[in-house]
């Protein structure tokens, strides 16, 4: 399986997850809540402040 996530290296996992919401003009509280919820669904709730380079590509 290819692993090309199109993540922005200088942004944390949660910032990457919230990026589209930010571009769409969503409130910061909404951005944070929805990004954290999505990351919880995929098991990354403990890696919110990690950067893409810190994630395993295993």
Image (cartoon, rainbow, N blue to C red):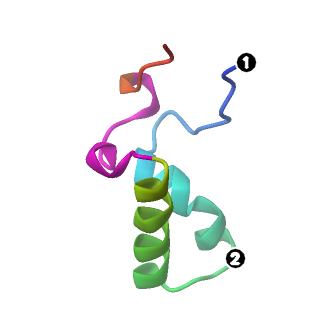
Q: Residue at x 69, y 76 (%)?
A: 24
Residue 53: where, in percent of width, then height? Answer: 43, 23
Give the camera-side residue of 50 and 37: 37
Q: Which label is found at residue 2?
A: 1
Q: Secondary structure at mark 2?
A: loop
Q: Is residue 46 magenta?
A: yes
Read off the residue under disc 2: 24
| Contact between labelled residues 2 and 1, with CB atoms less than 8 Å apart | no
Q: Residue at x 46, y 31 (%)?
A: 52
**In this rendering, position of residue 19 left or right of residue 23:** left
Q: Residue at x 33, y 50 (%)?
A: 48
Residue 25: where, in percent of width, then height? Answer: 63, 81
Residue 56: where, in percent of width, then height? Answer: 42, 20
Give the mark count.
Answer: 2
Quarter of the figure with the N terminus: top right
Alpha carbons under labels 1 and 2: distance apart = 28 Å
Q: Is residue 20 above or below residue 57?
A: below
Q: Is residue 25 above or below residue 41?
A: below
Give the camera-side residue of 22 and 43: 43
The quadrant where residue 19 appears: bottom right
Give the camera-side residue of 16 and 38: 38
Q: Is residue 1 above or below residue 27?
A: above
Q: Is residue 2 above or below residue 30?
A: above
**In this rendering, position of residue 48 left or right of residue 23:** left
Mark 2 burial class by Cα count in 10 Å: few <14, some 14-19, many 20+: few
Q: Is residue 10 magenta?
A: no
Q: Which label is found at residue 10?
A: none
Q: Could you tell which of marks 1 and 2 lies nearer the N-terminus?
A: 1
Q: Which residues are magenta?
A: 43-53
Mark 1 burial class by Cα count in 10 Å: few <14, some 14-19, many 20+: few
Q: Secondary structure at mark 1?
A: loop
């Amino acid at each position: 399986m290819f692993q090309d996530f199109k993540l922005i290296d200088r942004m944390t996992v949660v910032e990457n997850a919230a990026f589209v919401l930010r571009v769409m003009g969503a409130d910061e509280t909404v951005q944070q809540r929805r990004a954290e919820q999505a990351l919880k669904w995929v098991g990354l709730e403990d890696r919110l402040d990690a950067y893409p380079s810190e994630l395993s590509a295993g």
